Image (cartoon, rainbow, N blue to C red):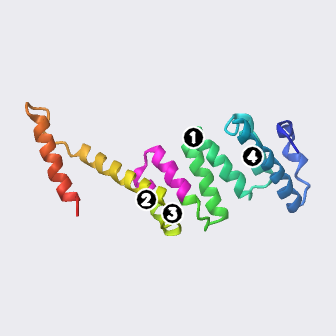
Amino acid sequence: LLGKSAVKRTFQDFKNLSDQQRANQSNEYLDDYIKTFSDGTYNDPESLEILDRAIEINPKNVDAYFYRSFAYFDNQNYDDALADTERILELNPNDPDIPYMRAIIYKEKGDLELSLEEIEKSLETYPDDPYLEDMKAEVENQIEQEYRAKQVPPDADEEGGIVKRQTYYDEITKELTP
């Protein structure tokens, strides 16, 4: 197959190919990229170049965007990971796995409200997924904790403040619990 040395080729090498030839060539790059999972280099810059090339040759290669988003996520490059998931949704608006992926990215990024929205979308497709249910409960718990942290009573630092703070939190919890 192509190997990492083929990344050095320029876009000019591919501009005269038909759409089908470009798709085939792009998929060959993708096949080379998938091999990087076995040696653990799937998120290295050189491996990402393979995906960049696959996308450059065929900007409609949804799988290349998916794998690149995964690699970006693994490198904690959440904004680029989200940008690739947006591109996937432009190409395939009904892709059932993208909300799932976006929920995880938003959660790791700390955007809990957006994560929860994506979890809800994913649950429409995968209603019995125990991982999604666990992630939903975890995100809801984190949101509640953040809410509580913002509701610290003004006298919490006074002597006996810990008891006052716990009493205050208990009252808030009663209000939030149906």
Q: Which of labels 1 and 4 is toward the front?
A: 4
Q: Which residue is mark 1?
A: 77
Q: Nearer the viewer, residue 63 or 12?
A: 63
Q: Name the residue at 85% across, 40% down.
A: 3
Q: Secondary structure at mark 1?
A: loop
Amino acid at pointer 1: Asn
Q: Which of labels 2 and 4 is toward the front?
A: 2
Q: Secondary structure at mark 3?
A: helix
Q: Is residue 124 left or right of residue 11?
A: left
Q: Is residue 150 left or right of residue 156?
A: right
Looking at marks 2 and 1 on the same chain, the residue that comes earlier in the sequence is marked by 1
Q: Which residue is mark 3?
A: 122
Looking at the picture, how far across and down is residue 41, in whole percent? 70, 35
User: Could you say which disc has been placed on residue 127 in the image?
Assistant: none
Looking at marks 2 and 4 on the same chain, the residue that comes earlier in the sequence is marked by 4
Give how far apart the Cα atoms at labels 2 and 4 are: 30 Å
Q: Which residue is mark 2?
A: 133
